[in-house]
Image (tube, rainbow, N blue to C red):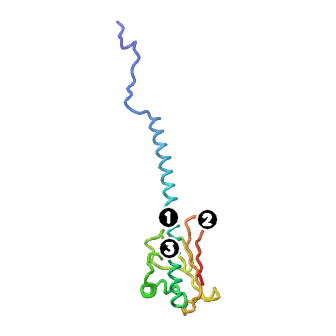
Amino acid sequence: MISVQGLMPQKRDEQGFTVIELLIVIVVLIILSVLVITTYGGIQQKNRNLSRQNNLEALHQQIEIYFQKQGHYPSRTDMDNSAWLAKNMKSLDPSLLIDPSNPTHSEQLVAAASAKSYAYAPTQIDGVSSCENKDTTCAKYTLIATYEGNVNGASKLTIPSTN
């Protein structure tokens, strides 16, 4: 006797996925993950650059208000002294001095802008000579922040003194 099972095609057990189907799903998930991570990184970078712009604009306003009251700009030594800031620039939020990509950095401005700090360069009226020895001679300044990447074709944000 011939068995009926021998003549009938065997049914494949279709309860799982094939290796090819699993690989396709994994590849699609990897592509989506890369897109999300890249987009998120770009958004974070834009947010930090916007924070830099806002911080420097607010800092610029505070320094200009100080100039209107005192007739000169503060020296960098003054700007890096928290006690001096608390006494002379009471409405200045110290967090404005910190670059958003380096929140653990001290609240100090540096002479030349770097990727993780802001530069404040006060000078005498000639725009070259230092005014650190006698800060009442500070007649100009430049605030500088380094962008992450470029913003409108610029790698740095530079804000000069108004006067």
Residue under the image location 46 percent in, 40 percent down: 25
The residue pinned by badge 2 equals 152
Residue 75 position (above or below residue 114):
below
User: At numbered mark 3, what does the secondary structure look like: helix, strand or loop?
Assistant: helix
User: At numbered mark 1, what does the secondary structure look like: helix, strand or loop?
Assistant: helix
Question: Horizontal placement of 142 versus 89: left or right?
Answer: right
Q: Earlier in the sequence, mark 2 or mark 3?
A: 3
What is the three-letter code of the residue carrying label 1?
Answer: Asn
The residue pinned by badge 3 equals 55
Name the residue furthest right: 126
The residue pinned by badge 1 equals 47
Foreground of the two, 161 or 5: 161
Question: Horizontal placement of 108 versus 8: left or right?
Answer: right
Question: Residue 13: x and y, percent?
Answer: 37, 26
- Quadrant of image for the C terminus: bottom right
Question: Horizontal placement of 161 versus 11: left or right?
Answer: right
Few, some or many residues within 10 Å of mark 3 (<14, 14–19, 20+): many
Residue under the image location 40 percent in, 12 percent down: 7
Q: Are marks 1 and 2 in contact (CB under 8 Å)?
A: no
Residue under the image location 35 percent in, 10 percent down: 3
Q: Earlier in the sequence, mark 1 or mark 2?
A: 1
User: At numbered mark 2, what does the secondary structure look like: helix, strand or loop?
Assistant: loop
Answer with the quarter of the image where residue 11 lies: top left
